[in-house]
C-alpha cells in the first residue's frame, strides 16, 4: 500500500467522523431553536397523530455538518464548488418551504435552476450512447425527480435518513471502484452527517428532516449517483443507480399512480405511501424502518452486481426485480389504506410529506 492510498484512506475516515461529530452537536441545538421559534410539525388528529409538536429543520443540521466535514477534510475544486452552490440553492428552497412561504411552482423552478447550475459545473449524466442534449434533459429529470422522491418518502420516523445512508454507502463503493476520490469524500461526509441526524430521528423521533433535509439528501444522492461510472462491461448497468435508489423511486411512482387512478391531484397529500399503508395495518415505525433498510441494502447489493456480471445475467436480475415490484404493488393495493386507528404509541407517528 503506497503513501497516497494511506493518506486518502485516512481522509475518508476523517470526513465521516467529522460529519458525524459535528452533526451530533448541531442537531439538538437546532432542535431547541426550532421548538423555541415554533418551526414544528403540529399534530392534526388525522395523519399527524403524534401528541406533541416535533421540531423541523433537522436538515439544517445535516447540511451544516456536511459542509464542515468537506471544508475541513478536502480542497474546494471547481467540481466541489459547483455541487455546493447547487446544493445550497436546494437547502434554501427547502428552508423557505418549511417556513410555509414558498409555492410548489416556485419550488420546482428553483430545483430546475439548481440542476442547471450543476450542469454548468460539468456534473451531469454522461452516457456515450446518447446525445448531449438528451443527457441534459435526463439530468434535470433525474435530479428533480430524486430530490422530490426523498421528500415524499419522509413520512415515518427514521425512514428517509436511513435509506439515504444505506444508498450513500453503496455509492461510496462505486466511487472507490472508479478511483474517484472527490465523490468518495463527499459521499462519506453525507453518510456521516445523516447518521448523526438518525440518532435523533430514529423512532420515536424528536426532530424531523423537513423539506430542507429531505430535498438536500435527494439532490446530493442523485448528483453523486450520476457522477459514478457503472457500465464497466455493458450498457445495461447504466440502470444501477435506479436500482440502488429503488426505495424512494418506487414509493414516488406508486403514490403518483394511485393518485392518478383515484383522481387525486399529484401535489395533494394522501395516505398512499407504502409506509403509511403498513402502519395503518399494524406495522410499527421501527418495523417499517427495518424493512426499508433491508430492502435498500438488498437493492444496493443488486445494483453493484449489475455492474460486474454478464449482460444476460444483469437483464435477468432486472426482470426478477420487475416481477417482485409488481407483486409488491399488488400487495399494497390489497392492503388498501387499512383501518383508521390511533397509533399504539403516542411517540411514533406517520407524517404526510411537507
Image: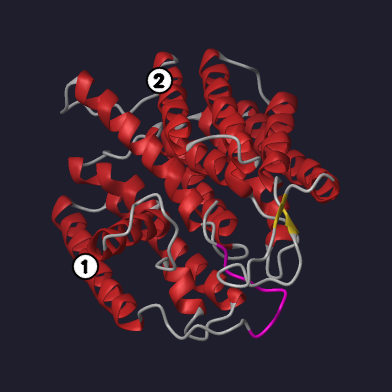
Image-based side of 165 in relation to 299, left or right: right
Q: Residues within 10 Å of mark 1 (few under 14, many from 20)?
A: few
The residue shown at (56%, 32%) is 93
Confirm whether the magenta stretch covers residue 348: yes
Q: Quadrant of residue 341?
A: bottom right
Camera-side residue: 283 or 299? 283
Q: Are marks 2 and 1 in contact (CB under 8 Å)?
A: no
Q: Residues within 10 Å of mark 2 (few under 14, many from 20)?
A: some
Q: How is the image coloured?
A: secondary structure
Q: Quadrant of residue 253?
A: bottom left
Taken as a whole, is the magenta stretch helix, strand or loop? loop
Q: Which mark is residue 116?
A: 2
The residue shown at (70%, 50%) is 56
In the image, residue 100 sits, relative to residue 243, either above or below, namely above
Image-based side of 185 in relation to 340, left or right: right
Region rendered in magenta: 344-351
The residue shown at (46%, 54%) is 152
The residue shown at (52%, 24%) is 86
Residue 346, image x and y in percent?
A: 71, 78
Amino acid at each position: 500500500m503506497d503513501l497516497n492510498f494511506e493518506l486518502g484512506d485516512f481522509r475518508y475516515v476523517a470526513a465521516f467522523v467529522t460529519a458525524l461529530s459535528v452533526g451530533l452537536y448541531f442537531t439538538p441545538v437546532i432542535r431547541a431553536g426550532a421548538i423555541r421559534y415554533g418551526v414544528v410539525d403540529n399534530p392534526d388528529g388525522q395523519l399527524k397523530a403524534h401528541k406533541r409538536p416535533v421540531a423541523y429543520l433537522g436538515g439544517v443540521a445535516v447540511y451544516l455538518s456536511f459542509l464542515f466535514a468537506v471544508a475541513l477534510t478536502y480542497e474546494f475544486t471547481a467540481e466541489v464548488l459547483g455541487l455546493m452552490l447547487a446544493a445550497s440553492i436546494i437547502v434554501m428552497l427547502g428552508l423557505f418551504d418549511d417556513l410555509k412561504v414558498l409555492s410548489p411552482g416556485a419550488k420546482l423552478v428553483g430545483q430546475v435552476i439548481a440542476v442547471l447550475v450543476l450542469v454548468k459545473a460539468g456534473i451531469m449524466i454522461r452516457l456515450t450512447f446518447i446525445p448531449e442534449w438528451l443527457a441534459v434533459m435526463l439530468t434535470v429529470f433525474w435530479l428533480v425527480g430524486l430530490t422530490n422522491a426523498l421528500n415524499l418518502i419522509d413520512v415515518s420516523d427514521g425512514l428517509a435518513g436511513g435509506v439515504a445512508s444505506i444508498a450513500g454507502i453503496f455509492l461510496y463503493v462505486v466511487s472507490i471502484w472508479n478511483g474517484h476520490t472527490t465523490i468518495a469524500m463527499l459521499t462519506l461526509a453525507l453518510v456521516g452527517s445523516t447518521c448523526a441526524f438518525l440518532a435523533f430521528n430514529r423512532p420515536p423521533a424528536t426532530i424531523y428532516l423537513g423539506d430542507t433535509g429531505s430535498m438536500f439528501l435527494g439532490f446530493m444522492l442523485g448528483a453523486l449517483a450520476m457522477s459514478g461510472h457503472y457500465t464497466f462491461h455493458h450498457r445495461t448497468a447504466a440502470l444501477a443507480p435506479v436500482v440502488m435508489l429503488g426505495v424512494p423511486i418506487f414509493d414516488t411512482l406508486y403514490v403518483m399512480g394511485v393518485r392518478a387512478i383515484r383522481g387525486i391531484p399529484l401535489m395533494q397529500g394522501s395516505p398512499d405511501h407504502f409506509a403509511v399503508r403498513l402502519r395503518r395495518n399494524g406495522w410499527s415505525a421501527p418495523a417499517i424502518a427495518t424493512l426499508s433498510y433491508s430492502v435498500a441494502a438488498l437493492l444496493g447489493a443488486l445494483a453493484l452486481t449489475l455492474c460486474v456480471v454478464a449482460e444476460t445475467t444483469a437483464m435477468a436480475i432486472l426482470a426478477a426485480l420487475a416481477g417482485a415490484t409488481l407483486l409488491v404493488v399488488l400487495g399494497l393495493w390489497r392492503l388498501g389504506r387499512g383501518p383508521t386507528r390511533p397509533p399504539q404509541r403516542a411517540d411514533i407517528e406517520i407524517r404526510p410529506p411537507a
